[in-house]
């Protein structure tokens, strides 16, 4: 909710990073870093992870709500 250009929810309510589908391969530009930092610091579940290197993961595949 704090960074709608960066994060979205799939049909099951699982959040994901929109620019690179959760692979951690797309760097943030300076403007996006401000929104990212706000969302990262205020995430109540601490689900947002950050790294200076790409994550070792496959792109996010949205799930459907049951």
Image (tube, rainbow, N blue to C red):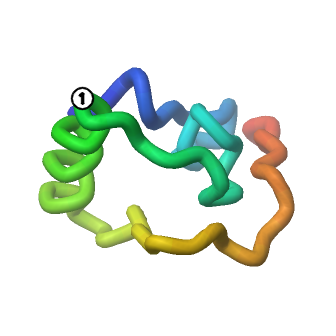
Residue marked by disc 1: 31
The residue at 60%/46% (across/down) is 26
Q: How many marks?
A: 1
Residue 2 in the image: x percent, y percent? Answer: 22, 33
Q: Residue furthest top?
A: 5
Q: Residues within 10 Å of mark 1 (few under 14, many from 20)?
A: few
**Residue 1 visible, this angle:** no
The quarter of the rendered structure image containing the N terminus is top left
**Residue 29 visible, this angle:** yes
Residue 59 higher or lower than 20, as above or below: below
> In the image shown, does 2 or 57 lie closer to the viewer?
57
Task: Please identify the quarter of the rendering in which residue 57 is found.
Answer: bottom right
Instruction: Name the element at disc 1.
Output: helix
Residue 54 in the image: x percent, y percent? Answer: 64, 68
The residue at 61%/59% (across/down) is 24
The quarter of the rendered structure image containing the C terminus is top right
The residue at 25%/58% (across/down) is 40
Task: Please identify the quarter of the rendering in which residue 48 is found.
Answer: bottom left
**Left/right of residue 42 with respect to residue 1 in the rendered view:** left
Residue 42 higher or lower than 36, as above or below: below
């Amino acid at each position: 909710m704090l960074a709608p250009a960066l994060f979205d929810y799939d049909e099951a309510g699982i959040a994901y990073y929109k620019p690179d589908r959760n692979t951690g391969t797309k760097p943030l530009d300076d403007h996006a870093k401000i929104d990212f930092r706000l969302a990262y610091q205020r995430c109540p579940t601490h689900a947002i992870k950050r790294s200076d290197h790409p994550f070792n993961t496959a792109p996010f595949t949205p799930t459907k709500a049951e």
